[in-house]
Amino acid sequence: MAENSYVFGGERRETPESSEQGTLNSWIDRRREVDSFLRAVLDEAIPGGASLAYVFGSGLLYLFLSQVITGMFLVLYYVPSADHAHTTVAYITKEVMSGSFIRGIHAYGSSAIIIVLLLHVTQTFLYGSYKGRRKILWLAGCALFALMLGMSFTGYLLPWDQKAYFATTVGTNILTYIPVVGNSLKSLLRGGTEMGTLTLSRFFVLHVLLIPAFILFCIAIHLFAFRKAGPAGPVQGDPETLKKTTEPFYPKQVLFDAIFALVIIGCLGLLAHYAPVELGPKANPIDTQYVPRPEWYYIPVFQWLKYWESGLAVIGILVIPSFVALLFVALPFLDRRPERRPWKRPVAVSIYGFIFIGLGALGAISHRNDLRDLNIAPQLAKQRADVEAFMKKPFQPELAGPSLIAATVALTNPVAAQGLKVYDQGGCAECHGNDLAGTSSAPPLIGVGDKYDSAKLESLLKEPTDAMTDGGMTSPDLKDEDLKVLIAFLEAVK
């Protein structure tokens, strides 16, 4: 007899403890149906048995959860404004404990999603898993593909460094090729005609709230459709043989999925630790020399756009990509034959392979052209050197209201006020910034009066050093009186 029950009048009765425990378990099971849900998921029949070819869907789900978790940590420090975004990302990268590692997991996770997504789409296509009762499953997957690309695009701008700013500028300019509504869409996405704080805030909302919400919705539809249709199974084999080799999802497929997730964890961790994600200098919109290059998975599209002149741009940028995307989405409606074996579908497989080989070739051509172009290659090398130099610098917190410092000095010192006018009229702000906080082209000037006396400042202005001239500094053509008030202004902004 069990210790938690007894017999009374020939009838077995439960003790209060066992009765309460049983009631609690029944309450949970009735309301949440945990056991039945787990049984339904883990006992899912897989025709032909478990396979490593089926791990990509689970891998994508893990990567999405990883992006959500690491993104939550990054949001704790991030401020989506043109003034503070770059500084907060620099603080995460250089000062926060494990901040660089978490940012690396998040950044490399974005690329990993694209890679695993392409593998998943390729496996689905080659196995013909879109055929039969899987149209909704395919459509939800296509929507997830587009949303994941949108996540990568919106997240790319958030660091607000040179690369992010100019690559996103090029990306948003593509919208102008859409007839009638193109310019309106670009203004809506940017929050105006130029890139700024409104652009950052809108990209941030899209990246953190709207797109993830749509992704969760599409994941729910995708999983529901998968549960209804069931696994497609291998591409060949008679039904009787497949029935004999059918296995439940648990334990073998769960083990395969767990191993794949561990491989992803290991790869992301190693990359984040040994190859930390870099951050370049803060975005400088007036830098006309910068050569933008997008993330690697957008490079083929970037190269494709170069082949279309302005008159035919709408064909290459809008018509052809839209046609290919439409064919891709409509695939289960166009290919209705039950045949799933790839070697029996040579035309479809050849077209699919041609597209992927073409994208790879475009990426290789873009890289080769950058190396051979005598104008672009040195600039890209300089940009790379700027990124490395910025990463080596210690974190510099934002100055407390640099624009206020200049304004206060002008109000309290009449001579410095005249110097501020010379500073503005002489074009000094183009490189050193309106608030003297510096840009990627020139260092900040606040505090320069503590570093040099008036004689040294005058000497540097009249005869810039080699390093200053290499950065584009020229001796200002000023009258002696204007030069004196400018020096007085620089000495006062401490």
Image (cartoon, rainbow, N blue to C red):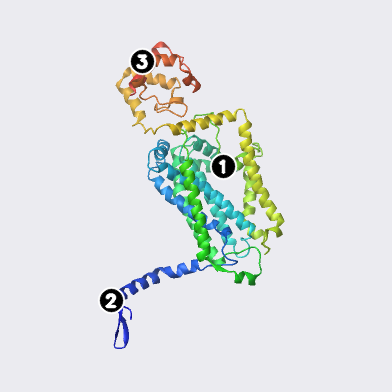
Residue designated by label 3:
454
Q: Decide if residue 274 is on the left or right side of residue 406.
A: right
Q: Looking at numbered disc 2 in the image, what kind of residue is underneath it?
A: Pro
Q: Quadrant of residue 159?
A: top left
Q: Looking at numbered disc 1 in the image, what kind of residue is underneath it?
A: Trp
Labelled pair 1, 2 in contact (Cβ < 8 Å): no
Query: Which residue is more in the foreground, 157 or 99?
Result: 99
Q: Looking at numbered disc 3 in the image, what kind of residue is underneath it?
A: Ser
Identify the residue at horizontal 44%, vertical 14% (top origin).
Answer: 462
Residue designated by label 2:
16
Residue 115, position in %: x, y? 56, 49
Residue 483, position in %: x, y? 40, 14
Query: Mark 1 falls on what kind of element?
Result: helix
Residue 416, position in %: x, y? 34, 19
As drawn, the label of residue 296 is: 1
Calculate the distance from the C-alpha at mark 1 to the C-alpha at mark 2. Answer: 65 Å
380 is higher (above) or lower (below) than 274? above
Q: Nearer the viewer, mark 3 or mark 1?
A: 1
Identify the residue at horizontal 50%, vertical 62% (top origin).
Answer: 254
